[in-house]
Image (cartoon, rainbow, N blue to C red):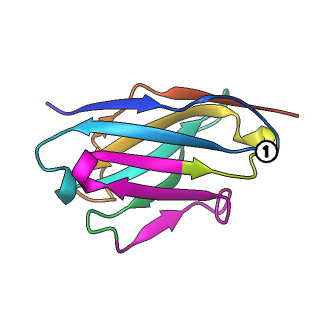
Amino acid sequence: QVQLVESGGGLVQAGGSLRLSCAVSIQTFSRVATGWFRQAPGKEREKLAYITASGFYTYYADSVKGRFTISRDNAKNTFYLQMNSLKSEDTAVYYCAVGVTSNSFTSWGQGTQVTVSS
């Protein structure tokens, strides 16, 4: 049974920064891909970023490229999303997820609200 616990969401002004964390209870954390997704009201879920188990490859959606950074700490079973230069359109519920590969995320966090004010 895999459990993911998110933290770090909240209110921030446009142009500001937040860091989201996802703590993962799994024996093989170093062997799974980790990713971040978001969903705004009335919109489809969007894949934002992922990093492979090795950490040697990362992916970013065009909407966040250059502003967001994904990283992982295998010693702590935790991964992160550093969000800089936030915009009002970044307002959404953010979810962390893990999977055997970056093509199949099977376990999800509870979601954390990020609200960016103008």
At x 26%, y 59%, the residue is: 101
Q: Is residue 65 magenta?
A: yes
Left or right of 25: which side holds 86? Answer: right
> Can residue 4 be seen by looking at this rendering?
yes
At x 80%, y 38%, the residue is: 88
Q: Is residue 57 magenta?
A: yes
Image x and y of residue 86, in percent: 74, 46
Q: How many marks?
A: 1
> Can residue 45 be seen by looking at this rendering?
no
Left or right of 71: which side holds 105? Answer: left
Image: 117 above or below 74: above
Per the rendered image, the range of residues in magenta is 56-81
Image x and y of residue 67, in percent: 67, 59
Image x and y of residue 52, in percent: 32, 64
Few, some or many residues within 10 Å of mark 1 (<14, 14–19, 20+): some
Residue farthest right in this picture: 118
Please identify the quadrant where the N terminus is shown: top left
Asked which quadrant contains residue 72, the reply is: bottom left
Q: Work out whether residue 112 or residue 106 is closer to the camera in this orientation and state it.
A: 112
Which residue was labeled with disc 1?
87
Task: Name the amino acid, label 1.
Answer: Lys
Image x and y of residue 114, in percent: 64, 31
